[in-house]
Amino acid sequence: MSDTRHRLNLRLLEQYIAVAEERHFHRAARRLNMSQPPLTHAIQRLEEILGVVLIERGQRVLGLTAAGQTFLEEARRTLEQTAHAVSATRDMAAGRTGTVRLGYVGSALYGRLPDVLRDFRLACPGIRLELRETTTAAQLAALREDRLDVGVLIPPLSEADDLNLSAFDRDRLCLALPADHPLALEGEPALHELAEAPFILWPMAEGRGFCLQVFRLCANAGFVPNIAQEAHGMHAVLSLVAVGAGVSIVPESMRGFRSDRIRYCSISGGDSEFELMLATHRATPAANAFIQAARFLE
């Protein structure tokens, strides 16, 4: 069987299909742009390889044996599958098909990411997107372990020389207080007025750069935040603020989250600004297509 597969080739299948469909060696040879004797020899060789008679030879019109009809159907299917394999491979290599496993920090959903996702789906319908909300630290590990293709994360990043980074979005930090907090009821509080308030933040290990920026803002305001509770993820942090468990410093883009229960207040000064980056480790063609689309759609 393996020897038979080795001796068969796509050209031989194409020649047989032409003869079987034309039912005439001369017409089939003309269709294949070749002379008739080599074609006749090729069909004879095919029958020898298979060990069966495929063609019933008459005076002028050829017929197919039952085995010949079966082989015709299978040969057509083989050529169609080969053409599909070639097309699929070229599409994958060109970044027209595939899967992009995209990680993102929670606040990215409140910036330009939704528009980029929508436009990318329209521009590249053959690429499947898998979305995973997770922290910067978790994204870094997943990128390096090939569990994510692209990350939307927050710098600064230590020891990131193995990553490819590009700018994606900008945001700034703001205060988040329970809507019934005394300072929220009085007006627009300044950061230093929260020096004694219990803070809800996320673990340093999950977003070191982000946490350090929060601590730097508080230090500039003259205090060290009193961390009453830590929560995993920005939505969890804000949910705790909404129920009155404490105050926090969060991305301003999330002002719309539970705005009925949370009062968001701006923090003055350029130190409150931060950037979101796109990161890849070993980018696939589909991931590169997403990166290029995200840059183009800016």
Image (cartoon, rainbow, N blue to C red):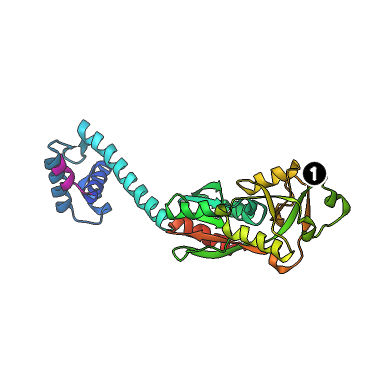
Q: Residue at x 26, y 39 (%)?
A: 72
Q: Is residue 119 left or right of residue 247?
A: left
Q: Residues within 10 Å of mark 1 (few under 14, many from 20)?
A: few
Residue furthest out toward the top:
66
Residue furthest out toward the right:
186
Asked if residue 255 lies in the magenta stretch, the reply is no
Name which residue type carries label 1: Asp
Question: In front: 280, or 156?
Answer: 156
Q: Residue at x 47, y 62 (%)?
A: 163
Q: Residue at x 78, y 60 (%)?
A: 192
Q: Is residue 69 left or right of residue 271?
A: left
What's drawn in magenta, residue-wise? 1-9
Q: Which residue is mark 1?
A: 260
Question: In front: 163, or 111?
Answer: 163
Quadrant location of the N terminus? top left
Say which quarter of the image contains residue 174: bottom right
Quadrant location of the C terminus? bottom right
Instruction: Name the spot of residue 150 as percent of width and height, x first.
Output: 50, 55
Say which quarter of the image contains residue 21: top left
Examine the rendering and report whether any part of residue 139 can be seen: yes
Question: In front: 71, or 122?
Answer: 122
Q: Is residue 20 left or right of residue 221?
A: left
- Label 1: which secondary element: loop
Instruction: Name the spot of residue 155 as percent of width and height, x first.
Output: 57, 62
Vertical relation: 63 (above or below) 281: above
Examine the rendering and report whether any part of residue 95 can be seen: no
Instruction: Name the spot of residue 171 as percent of width and height, x first.
Output: 67, 61
